[in-house]
Amino acid sequence: MSIPKIKTAVEEMVQPYLSSNGFELVDIEYVKEGSNYFLRIFVDKEGGIDIDDCGRISEYVSEQLDKNDPISDAYFLEVSSPGAERPLKKDEDVRKAVGKHVFLTTYEPISGAKEFEGLLLSFDGENAVVRTGKKDYTIPYTKVASARLAIVF
């Protein structure tokens, strides 16, 4: 099964459980690192998740994976928080980040730059406006390669 199909199958298995228990599925990764495969599930909830939450979710996911067996390779399952520099994967994630410090990279230069770190002023579904220093950049979201929250020191 291809990586996108694995991710979709896992999402379909875990999403109902997560939603019904107040968790948000942030991201799913299925990657090979060295000779090992890893299935990583990033989950969050209002107020953050703790180690007990991750343990309960891991047990549930493990049972579902054993029942449905969408992955033929041996792999390690990891369930964790997306962390302080959480990725912004969906439009809804970006909307929630308005007013917060973000880090965006683009596929091609915008005003001569491909990296933007600053305050996310707005997001209308098509454009993100990021203030870096004293300058505001309007970035078409179709040009965004990656986006995440950023920690300000």
Image: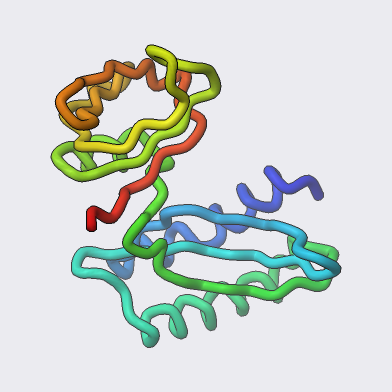
Looking at the picture, tell me which residue is in the foreground, 141 or 101.
101
Residue 103 versus residue 105 in the image, above or below: below
Horizontal arrangement in the rendering, residue 49 relative to residue 68 (left or right): left
Residue drawn at x 41%, y 49% as measured from the top left: 87
Above or below, comparing residue 23 to residue 5 in the picture: below
Residue at 32% from the left image edge and 48% from the top image edge: 149
Left or right: 48 as drawn, with respect to 30: left
Q: Position of residue 92 (x, y in %)?
A: 29, 38
Q: Is residue 55 above or below residue 106?
A: below
Q: How is the image coloured?
A: rainbow
Question: Residue placed at 23% from the left, 42% from the top?
Answer: 97
- Where on the picture, by quarter, is residue 72? bottom right
Question: Percent x, y for residue 147?
Answer: 41, 39
Q: As drawn, is 65 to the left or to the right of 97?
A: right
5 or 39: nearer the eye?
39
Figure quadrant of residue 123: top left
Residue under the image location 70 percent in, 75 percent down:
76
Q: Quadrant of the C terminus?
A: bottom left
In the image, 66 versus 51, the foreground residue is 51
- Where's residue 151, x and y in %? 28, 55
* Residue found farthest to the top: 111
* Number of numbered markers: 0
Does 52 sit left or right of 29 as displayed? Answer: left
Give residue 122's quadrant in the image. Answer: top left
Give the image location of residue 111, x and y in percent: 38, 12
- Which of the pair 131/34 is nearer the observer? 131
In the picture shown, does residue 15 fall above or below 134?
A: below
